[in-house]
Amino acid sequence: MLKNRRAKLERFFSSYGLDAILFTSTHNIRYLCGFSGSEGALLLTREAGWFLCDSRYTTQAFAEVEGVDIRQFTVKLDAVADLIEEMNFSRIGFEAARTTVADFRLLSAKLSNSELVAIEGEVDQIRSCKDSDELDQLQEVASLASNSLLAVLPLLKTGVSELDFARELEFEMRRRGAEGRAFDFIVASGERGAMPHGRASEKLILSGELVTIDFGAVRHGYYSDETVTVAVGQPNDRCREIYGIVKEAHDRAIAAVRPGITCRELDTIAREFIRECGYGDFFGHGLGHGVGLEIHEKPVVSPRSETIVEKGMVFTIEPGIYIPGFGGVRIEDTVVVTSNGCYSLTQVSKELMIL
Ligand code: ZN
Ligand code: ZN
């Protein structure tokens, strides 16, 4: 499995003319060699590889790392430079979007006979299409999170604070085996729903309010992401109207997901519908994002994304309408692209729930 993942690097070796590629971001390291710790470096050639870690992680590395040699270091960049010199590599690619200027300068200064070549954010695209192991992990964590929400939803009542509900949800996820929450949950009720990223606050939930709950869990390093907007008590006509529009935009975009369409086209399908309904000014963010070893990863699903959808990609579809002084609605599912469409990893029904 990891061999297939490393094979995806071939296009970088050939297009940049590289002898080796250096990875220092923990997510790419985990993806390519299995190490789940928080510090290390991975140097890969077409045929071989070295994982370097400090003494805190040596035992863990021997238990987790597959298919590459393991070396222990005292000073990371010294060890990387020594290895590059020892192997006589002349062109070494590095993750430009993940490397600090300070580290780049330090490493450059240590290398007398070799050149560091910036590979831009595109290197993260190797993780866009998930393999079967990853899809199993992503399904497991998405189901865990959805079921946790359904278990605690009866606690969402008039008079309960957003934060209390968020805490109950996190506890339920952990009880069901989550390593943690994917991010600070958004629980935005009433007027606070107008903030797309309105983190749970001390505000008490009032009768007749819509409550947007954006939540996710982490398990075995993989993330889930889902948003439901529910009504606590009977919502008014405008709330129902907005909910219906966002739901239809969500459904239309999901129905259009298939290999060959661009991410921009998917975004347009939802955005145009919301605009035709008169709410175009109230949907400011992109339609979605990839989910995997990070909560936000490739592909980006936005008006500017020319990425072509491929089988095995996993991304969110999350249109919303946010009206300052009134409130908002977002509906989000995380989908997997199949050979002719998609299916949803996230499980909570997106029909309007009135609690
Ligand atoms: Zn979300
Ligand atoms: Zn999201």
Image: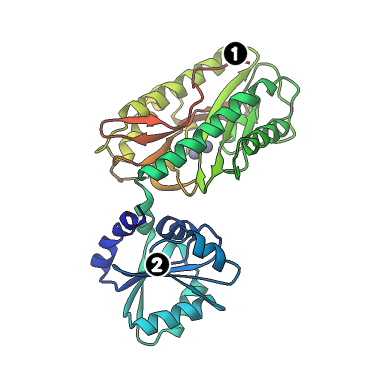
Q: Can residue 324 be seen in this view?
A: no
Q: Looking at the image, is 57 positioned above or below residue 191?
A: below
Quadrant where the image shows the C terminus: top right
Q: In this view, does 45 lie to the left or right of 179?
A: left
Residue annotated with mark 1: 236
Examine the image and state in which quarter residue 164 appears.
top right
Examine the image and state in which quarter residue 263 appears.
top left
Of the numbered discs 1 and 2, the one sitting upstream in the chain is 2
- Could you tell me which secondary element the residue under label 1 belongs to? loop
- Could you tell me which secondary element the residue under label 2 belongs to? loop
Residue annotated with mark 2: 68
Q: Residue at x 73, y 29 (%)?
A: 161
What whole-number distance in Å separates the C-alpha atoms at marks 1 and 2? 60 Å
Label 1: how many Cα within 10 Å (few below 14, some 14–19, many 20+): few
Q: Which of 126 and 57 is in front in this view?
A: 57
Q: Which of 295 and 253 is in front in this view?
A: 295
Task: Tell me which amino acid carries mark 1.
Answer: Asn
Determine whether the beta carbon of the residue marked 1 sits less than 8 angstroms from the nearest atom of ligand 1: no
Query: x%, y% of residue 267?
Result: 37, 35
Q: Looking at the image, is 234 positioned above or below residue 95?
A: above
Q: In this view, does 323 lie to the left or right of 245?
A: right
Label 1 close to label 2 by CB (< 8 Å): no
Query: x%, y% of residue 176?
Result: 61, 35
Q: Which residue is drawn at 40% across and 67% down?
A: 68
Q: Can residue 159 be seen in this view?
A: yes
Examine the image and state in which quarter residue 304 appears.
top left
Task: Tell me which amino acid carries mark 2.
Answer: Val
Label 2: how many Cα within 10 Å (few below 14, some 14–19, many 20+): some
